[in-house]
Image: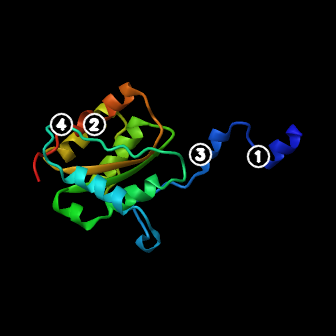
Amino acid sequence: MLEKADILGLKENARESLLWRTPSTSLLERSTIYGRDQDKEAIMELLFDDTTDAKISAIPIVGMGGFGKTTLAQLVYNDESLEQIFDLKLWIYVSENFDIQKITKTMIEAVTSSSCDMKDLGFLQLELKEKLIGKKYLVVLDDVWNENYGVWNDFQKPLQHRAKGK
């Protein structure tokens, strides 16, 4: 029985199938989305609320797979009214491996629209901080599995210099 499983490429651990998933993008076919208007509006209100003094605001969208979390994020991300308040919008697909270096590098490449050859996390974070300083930006991190507070704390260091106000 195990020989047949190996031949077919079957794995014992179901989580490995997550690696086969196609990465998401911000692109969306709006004509096929129904029933998310209230959720979208609730998130939009939070994004337009400018009363917080927090250096970073996060709006988690959590739930089981297949409930439309990514679709909801795409609806919000693609709303044209966000152009009024954000200088930059970044969509980053993360998945199970929360690699700060890779994510930071991807963010730099998204901001500059060019390849980044840096490898050192310190230099990457300084570069990202320089590109984002004084700007209002929206970052969507899609398919995040990491719950490690220390990793999140390290990741957000270059993001703490956003512009205030609308």
Report if residue 126 is visible in the image.
Answer: no
Question: Given this view, does label 4 or label 2 mark the residue nearer the observer?
Answer: 4
Query: Circles 1 and 2: CB distance less than 8 Å?
Result: no
Give the mark, 2 or 3, whose residue is nearer the N terminus.
3
Give the mark, 4 or 2, whose residue is nearer the N terminus.
4
Q: Is residue 155 above or below residue 22?
A: above
Q: Badge 2: few (under 14), some or many (20 or more) residues near its Cα, within 10 Å?
A: many
Q: Is residue 86 above or below residue 104?
A: below
Indicate the amino acid at tag 3: Leu
Give me the residue at 25% from left, 41% from top. Answer: 57
Q: Is residue 78 above or below residue 8?
A: below
Indicate the amino acid at tag 2: Gln
Q: Which mark is residue 125?
A: 2
Query: In the shown orientation, is residue 29 left or right of residue 130?
Result: right
Indicate the amino acid at tag 1: Gly
Question: Given this view, does label 1 or label 4 mark the residue nearer the observer?
Answer: 4
Indicate the amino acid at tag 4: Ala
Kind of element beneath mark 2: helix
Q: Nearer the viewer, residue 153 or 75?
A: 75
Gap between marks 1 and 2 measured at Cα: 39 Å
Kind of element beneath mark 1: loop
On the image, numbered disc 3 is attached to which residue?
19
Kind of element beneath mark 4: loop
Q: Quadrant of the C terminus?
A: bottom left
On the image, numbered disc 1 is attached to which residue?
9
